[in-house]
Image (tube, rainbow, N blue to C red):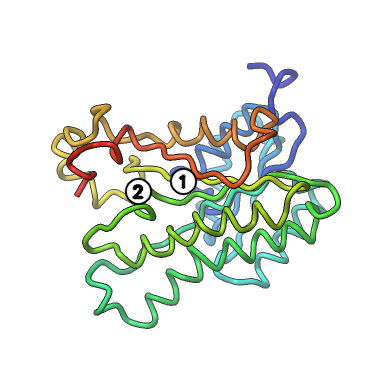
Amino acid sequence: MSREAGRLQDRVVLVTGASRGIGLAIARSCADEGARVVLTARHFEELEAAASTFPDPSRVAIRSSHAGSRESAKDLASWVVTTCGSLDVLVNNAATNPYFGPLVDIDDVRMTKTFEVNQAAIVTHVSAAWYAWMRDHGGAVLNIASIGGLSVEPGIGWYNVTKAAVIHLTKQFAFELAPRVRVNAIAPGLVRTAFARGLWEEREHAVSSQIPLGRIGEPEDVASLAVSLVSDDSSWVTGQTFVVDGGTTVSPSGGVS
């Protein structure tokens, strides 16, 4: 599709956790549709490397930011509006999972970190985008949740709790910010990313065999739907969470473990 026909022509899209994986794939797809994208993550060097993969440098800007900080979120939103002229789309993709094990054994430090990045950051970044631009001009928000927020799994229970909260936050913000801002979410299944490497790298064939569509996901599988949800294609859609998982959640086995 040409830029002239792009569904996000001249809109500014901010993507958190955008130095790799799903966030980077969403940013690339938005740029392909004519958007100017702002990549943000904690490490500037990784952002520089990610930005270098875009064919048109004029379509991408980078800004390091700490997803778990309210002040960083406010500074980021203000910088985007000042630098790029607007903040039309916010994609909340940043996430962390520093703990694997039973909920009864999680320590306060890792529990708090996961909450701050996965759950509280949704609130702080939506708030920052609202006051910096969207309250007066409208916009769209997309939150990246997980099918883990819809089920029970061993080992990653606290991560899944925060992702369940993302699904509910999507509904709450959709109600509170309508009609100026649409808010939706995607709940991916297992996707081929560095973040999820431990779940598939040593046993990809076995894992894929449990997924009805026969393979683990690619970041682009999520990105294609993301573009549709933040564009005018979905102008009458808000408060919804869309599962992209190759059929995992409809499998009689109950998903990948």
Q: In the rendered structure, which amino acid carries the disc numbered 1?
A: Arg
Q: Nearer the viewer, residue 176 or 143?
A: 176
Do residues under tags 2 and 1 come within 8 Å of each other at their CB atoms? yes
Q: Residue at x 21, y 61 (%)?
A: 154
Q: Nearer the viewer, residue 103 or 152?
A: 152
Q: Residue at x 41, y 62 (%)?
A: 96
Where's residue 251, x and y in %? 23, 37
| Residue 159 visible here | yes
Residue 60, numbered label: none
Circle 1 sits in a helix, a strand or a loop, which is it? loop
Where's residue 100, x and y in %? 26, 66
Image check: 140 left or right of 166? right
Q: In the rendered structure, which amino acid carries the disc numbered 2?
A: Ala
Q: Residue at x 64, y 50 (%)?
A: 62
Q: Earlier in the sequence, mark 2 or mark 1?
A: 1
Where's residue 108, x and y in %? 38, 83
Where's residue 254, x and y in %? 22, 45
Residue 194, numbered label: 2
Q: Determine the residue located farthest toward the right in the rendered image.
A: 136
Q: Which residue is mark 1?
A: 20
Q: CA separation, marks 2 and 1?
A: 8 Å
